[in-house]
Image (cartoon, helix red, strand yellow):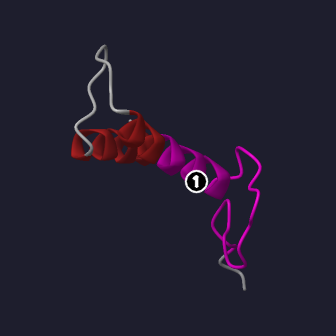
Amino acid sequence: MDDFAVQLAREARRLGLTAGEVQDAEVLLAFAELVLTELAARGLVPDAAPQPGCWARPRPTEN
């Protein structure tokens, strides 16, 4: 399992989310924001407000 999936699972547990249950809208919003932020940081979805120094992939070590 990749570390992104592990990070998402850790955050879901921290927020008390479980599959198959109706969840609080605020908790789901917090989780969705984390997911979208991480996807944008990986360059997988557009970022509406990119910040300098945010890289979708590691910088080359030749620098």
Which quarter of the figure is the N terminus placed in?
Answer: top left
Give residue 8's quadrant in the image. Answer: top left
> In the image, what residue occupies the spot 71% across and 73% down?
51
Range covered by the magenta-colored residues: 32-60
Q: Nearer the viewer, residue 10 or 33?
A: 33
Name the residue furthest top.
20
Q: Can residue 49 be seen in this view?
A: yes
Name the residue furthest front.
25
Residue 58: horizontal and vertical position, in percent? 63, 67
Note whether 63 is above or below 34 in the view shown: below
Q: Can residue 2 be seen in this view?
A: no
Tell me the residue that label 1 is attached to: 37
Q: Which of 42 and 20 is in front in this view?
A: 20
Which quarter of the figure is the C terminus placed in?
Answer: bottom right
> In the image, what residue occupies the spot 33% across and 32% down?
24
Residue 43: horizontal and vertical position, in percent? 71, 52
Give residue 22's quadrant in the image. Answer: top left
17 vs 35, left or right, is left
- The amino acid type of the residue labelled 1 equals Thr
Mark 1 residue crowding within 10 angstroms, few (<14) / some (14–19) / many (20+): some
Q: Is residue 58 within the magenta segment?
A: yes
Residue 32: horizontal and vertical position, in percent? 50, 41
Give residue 31's quadrant in the image. Answer: top left
In the structure shown, which secondary structural element does the residue marked by tag 1 occupy? helix
> In the image, what residue occupies the spot 41% across and 47% down?
3
Q: Which of 14 and 29 is in front in this view?
A: 29
Note whether 27 is above or below 43 in the view shown: above
